[in-house]
Image (spheres, rainbow, N blue to C red):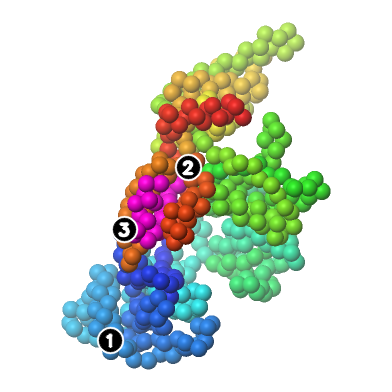
Amino acid sequence: MDKYRVPRIAFINKMDRVGADFSQAIQSMEKRLGAKAQAIFLPIGAEEDFRGLIDLIRMEAIFYDPIDPTGLSFERGPIPEDAREMAELEREALIETLADFDETIADRYLEGATIDADSLHAAIRTATLALELCPVIPGTAFKNKAVQMLLDSIIQYLPCPLDLPSIEAEDSKGKAVSVEPDDTAQLSGLAFKLMNDSYVGKLVFVRIYSGTLKKGSALLNVRTGKTERIARILLMKANAREDIEIAYSGDICALVGLRDVVTGDTLCEKSHPIRLEPPSFPETVISMSIEPKTSADQDKLEQGLERLSEEDPTFFVSTNEDTGQTLISGMGELHLEIIRDRLFREFKVEAEAGRPQIAYRECFGHDANGEGKFVRQAVDNPQFAHACIEVKALERGAGILIESQLPEGKLPEAFIASTLEGIREAANNGVIASYPVTDFKAVLTDASFDEVESSEMAFKMAGIFAFKEAMEASQALLLEPMMQVEVETPEEYQGDIMGDLNRRRGQIQNMSSRSLYSIISASVPLSEMFGYSTTVRSLSKGRATYSMNPECFQPVPENILKGILNANYLS
C-alpha cells in the first residue's frame, strides 16, 4: 500500500471477543506497522458488553439494539457520563493531530473556538488522502456493528479517481504515458481478478482507468495481441449483480465473454495500445503432487485445477517431467489444503496429495563472469557461437534482470535475443540442486559469431553454458523460504511456545502482551513448520492461535544443506 500510496482506513474487528482491547490495537498499529492511527470512534463496552460507539466527530453515542442480532437497528443519543471525559480527551487528541496538517483547524484550536463536524470531516479527508492519517473504527463485522460507520467513512474519507494522480503506463514502444480518469479519453482497463460462475462462466473483474466501456465492444488484450468482445457488463453488489450497458472511468465491473484473459492483463482500444502496470505476487513457497482417488476423475481434476489456477495468481499447476505427476504450488500448507477442499466442494473430485515439497531457490554467492562456447564440427551442419556475460548478485527479493550491453552491430539482434533466452532458461535450474535461480543481474558483455556457422540455437546454448559457468564460479547459495509467524498464547504457555520455535530454527523478533495473552513474532523456515498447528494446540491445550505468512528467502545453513542434498539424491 505504501508503494502505491494508497490511502487507508482501519477497522478493528471482533471487539466483542474476549481480550479485545481497542487502545492496544491502535498502539500495535503504530508500533508494528508504522501507521499514523487515530480513532474517530470509540467503543462503548468491551468483549461481551460491547454495545455501541462514541462518534468523536459529532460527539454522540450510537447504541445498538441488544435484541436485534443483525446489528441493523441502532439509535444516536448523548454520550454516557462515565465515558464523556475519555471522549473529550480523545476528540482533543484527534483535533491536535489534524491541526498539524490543516491550518484552519490549527487556528481555531489555538483560538479556543468550537470546531464543527463538517470542518473535522474535511480535515480528516485531507489528511487521509495525503497519507498523514489512518482513521480507526472499532466494531464487530459478524454482528454488523460499526459496519455502517465504516461504509460512511469510506465514502467520506477515501479518494475518488479524480483525487488521485494520473496512472503511469507504457505505450507500444515502451515509452511512459499518463492515463487520466477521463470519460472522453481512449479506453484502458486492468483485469485484476477472475472468478468462475456456474451460470455465466468466467467473470473478469476490471477497473476502468480511462474512457468508457460499452456492451458489445471489442477490446485489445495487450498481452496476447488478440481481440476480446464484451458480451455483458455486470455491476457487482456483494452476492447480487446488475446488467449495465456502459461503464465509465473509475468504475469497477465484471465482464462476461472474455476468453484468453488472466489477472494483470491490460484491455484497451486497438488504435491506442498501452500496458498498465500489473499487480505483483509473491513466489510460491511449497509444492506437492496431487492425483484423483479414481482414474475416472482425472479429467475433472485437470479441469478443476485449470479453473482454480486462473482465479488465483499465487496458485500454479505443473507437471514433473521425470515422473509425470501433477504438481500444485502455493503460498503454504493451508493454501493447498483449501485448494483440495475446493476441488471436492466445487468440482466433486476427491484428490490425494503427496508429501509437501519446499520451493527452494538458488542465488549467486558473489559477482562472477561466465564464458560460453558452442562448437559443433559437423560436416553437414557446423555450429559456432561465443558469448561472455557478467553476473551481479542482487539483494534478496530483487528478482531477475537480463540485458545486453553489446555495442551496436557487434552481434545480430536475433542472436542477442537467443543468448538472453538461453540465460533465462538456464536460470530455471541452478547448479546446487536444480532449483530456480533468483536475485541476479546478467549482462551480455561480449560475443563473436560466424557468418556461415552461427545460428540462434547455437547462441542459446552459448548463453546457457556462460550462465552455468558464472554460477559455478560464484559459490552459489541455496535459499529457503522463511515465514513470518505470530503466535498468540496465554502467558503460562509462553515458554513452551518459544522453546518449540527455537527448536524449529526460529528467530524471535518481537514479544508483546495483551491482557493475559502473550504475542510472539518469529521468523521460521517453512521446512520446519509442517504440522505446527497440531503442535501449538498440544502445547497450549488448544488455547493458542497462530498466523503464518511468507516473509523472504534466506541462505540455508551448511548443516541443513547436506540433508537437503541427500534427500534430493535419494528421491
Q: Mark 2 = which residue?
A: 528
361 left or right, relative to 88: right
Q: Position of residue 197 (x, y in %)?
A: 71, 63
How far across and down, in percent of the image, does residue 54 sit? Answer: 35, 82
Task: Locate the C terminus and report the quarter of the image it occupies.
Answer: top right
- Which percent across, then down, holds residue 555? 43, 34
The mark tally for this picture is: 3
Q: Amino acid at mark 3?
A: Ser
Label 2: which secondary element: helix
Q: Could you give the CA–CA distance between mark 2 and mark 1, rounded to whole angstroms?
A: 50 Å
Where is mark 3, residue-wise?
512
Residue drawn at (65%, 24%) of the image: 456
Residue 74 visible to an observer of this rendering? yes
The residue under the point 60% across, 50% down is 336
Question: Does the magenta portion include 562?
Answer: no
User: x, y percentage for residue 365?
Assistant: 42, 27
Q: Are marks 3 and 2 in contact (CB under 8 Å)?
A: no
Of residue 490 and residue 163, the one placed in the foreground of this image is 490
Separation of residues labelled 1 and 3 (CA atoms): 29 Å
Image-quadrant location for residue 377: top right
Earlier residue among tags 2 and 1? 1
Q: Which mark is residue 82?
A: 1
- Image: 442 above or below 57: above
Magenta residues (range): 482-500
